[in-house]
Amino acid sequence: MKRKKHVIDARRCKSCGLCVDVCPKGALAIGHTLNESGSEVVENDPEKCVLCGLCRIVCPDVAIGVIEIIDQ
Ligand code: SF4
Ligand code: SF4
């Protein structure tokens, strides 16, 4: 069975907030975990996320992916 999953590459996030602003479901927020660059990594609430991919499109640092997983 195929399903989609939202993934964030913590190393790439610079806390710009563009993805937070664009999300139509309010599923993203700047978190409290710091990456190696000292940026607070954005976090996704899977209960709210509808996997539309808008955040992936706007992220200037290619830190977000909406990937397809095949369950065996
Ligand atoms: S748009 Fe990208 S770099 Fe900016 S906060 Fe979101 S994930 Fe991080
Ligand atoms: S995939 Fe869509 S609903 Fe999910 S966090 Fe990104 S913009 Fe929001």
Image: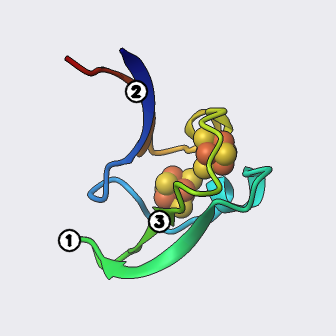
| Residue found at the far right of this picture | 24
- Measure the alpha-carbon separation of dots 2 and 3: 16 Å
Residue 64: name its quadrant.
top left
Q: Amino acid at mark 1?
A: Glu
Give me the residue at 61% from left, 33% from top: 53
Q: Amino acid at mark 2?
A: Ile
Q: Is mark 1 within 8 Å of ligand 1?
A: no
**Which labelled disc corresponds to residue 67?**
2
Measuring 39% from the left and 16% from the top, which residue is drawn there? 2
Camera-nearest label, 2 or 1 = 2
**Residue 55 in the image, given as x and y percentages of width and height:** 62, 43
Nearer to us in this view, 2 or 37: 2
Q: Nearer the viewer, residue 25 or 39?
A: 25
Tell me, yes or no, if residue 66 can be seen here: no
- Which residue position is annotated with label 3? 43
Check disc 1 and report the residue beneath it.
36
